[in-house]
Amino acid sequence: MSGLEDIGTPAATGHPWFGRHRLRPPDAPADTIREMLRTEIRDTGWPYQPLLPAAPIALPRASYAELFRATGALLDLVRRTALETAPTTEGRLAAYGMPDSEHRLFMADPFTEERYADCVARPDIMIGPDGPRFLEFNVSGALGGPVETHCRLEVWRKLYADDAGRLPFRCRSPFAVRAEMFRDLCAELAVAPRVALVGSARDQGVESTRYFDMEADHFNGHGLTARFFEPEDLHEAWDCPPRLRYPLGLRNFTLPDWAELGIDTAPVQAALDHGCLLVSTQTSTFLSSKLTMGLLSEGRPWMSAAERALVYRYLPWTRVLTHRRTSRGGREVDLVPFAVANRELLVLKESLGMSGKQVVIGRESGQAEWEAAVAGAAEAGTSVVQEFVAPRTCRLAMVADGAREPHDVEVAPVLGPLLFGGRPAGMFSRFFGDGTAGIVSVLGTNSSDDCVVAI
């Protein structure tokens, strides 16, 4: 069994938070590692990556636990912040300036809608000069990471296990934790343990349904009855004898993606109207909005001193961009002129966006481009400016196409701890495998990915 390797003092671009130990690459040829990683994630629509990890990213247990502890606490604050913007769904839609495309798929019962809005969450965390910084919260049954983390973890477990099945790291299986969440939800709702996985292979850009089938197979082997439904088949989840109905499910799609693909959401609305609870509910869109991060960063009247300290520690300075005054570094500033004058310190983000889209990094933009973007965003009132976090790195073994041996790279990972029903469910990561910097997105900017483990 491969063990730990002491890499000593962090590189000039590194950070002690990552620790001074990592996992050595497994005792396997580079071709084997590449083939296993690509085979495990096959037919899921995941992009081809010429640079693949040769080991999982390994964090000290204290650092690993810190991210989940902070994620749980901050998610509670995110939820409270989003819900208090208005007492009703209609009020929140107006307060957030949500596009018409988001004005649908809400459940008739507002309590149920709000109660199950945060079942599935994954923040994006960068390690900056002062440690972890939460750049955004993704709250949605369709967030990336669970399937990808499962596939990567399956490979590392096979390659690192000794003859007795022992591993030199710890990491929970996303599928196992999500199954636990659904079993508990079924008990809480007093319904049969039958789970519908709702999505579309068209989302993945492939004909295969393996992306969804892997999770359904796991659920079926662990105390649940699960089935994947394309929207055209979803009526079969409720228009059937009561004992065959699926009262609960995972909403593994986004409205923008389906709108782009021309997929009708009417079957989903019909399922909701006939009592099928799909998590996370549509209210999750308020929790995911970057406007919520701006409101939380600025502070809410109901926050305790401890909650304010938590936000100050983990959230970079973030403000909803409008023509107004706000606080920055203990002084009052006019927000729009301040944003214009401090291009290299800031990032501009629209409230809704995925895969690094709708993001402008000030230091990577010209002044004229930046001023135009800030002016337009300030008029719309649905964007935030956020303090730029200079990423710190950790050393990771990578294996390139055709290479016979792994090579070391200082990568700056975006870490994504998965939280299902409040439970730690493994950790996803994305980074540029060649050590470069920029907006990190596997789908948007062809970065690499890996799972993260504790040592």
Image (cartoon, rainbow, N blue to C red):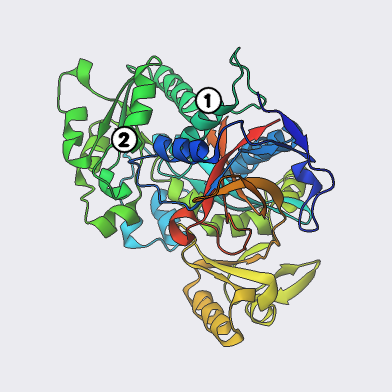
Mark 2 Cα shell of 10 Å, populated few (<14), some (14-19), many (≥20): some
Can you say which quadrant of the picture contains the N terminus? top right
Q: Is residue 203 left or right of residue 128?
A: left
Q: SS of the residue at dot 2?
A: helix
User: What amino acid is labelled 2 in the image?
Assistant: Arg
Indicate which disc residue 269 carries.
none
216 versus 33 height, above or below = above
Q: Nearer the viewer, residue 19 or 276?
A: 19
Residue at which label 1 appears: 158
Q: Specify the quadrant of the image occupied by residue 295.
A: bottom right
Q: Nearer the viewer, residue 250 or 33?
A: 33
Dots 2 and 1: beta carbons under 8 Å? no
Where is residue 337 drawn, in percent x and y? Answer: 66, 82
Q: Is residue 271 left or right of residue 239?
A: right
Where is residue 162 drawn, in percent x and y? Answer: 61, 18
121 versus 98 height, above or below = above
Q: Nearer the viewer, mark 2 or mark 1?
A: 1
Residue drawn at 38 percent across, 22 percent down = 219
C-alpha gap between disc 2 and disc 1:
20 Å
Where is residue 240 drawn, in percent x and y? Answer: 15, 23
Spot the residue most to the left. 240
Mark 1 Cα shell of 10 Å, populated few (<14), some (14-19), many (≥20): few
359 versus 363 height, above or below = above
Q: Is residue 200 left or right of residue 322?
A: left
Q: Specify the quadrant of the image occupied by residue 79.
A: top right
Residue at which label 2 appears: 210
User: What amino acid is labelled 1 in the image?
Assistant: Lys
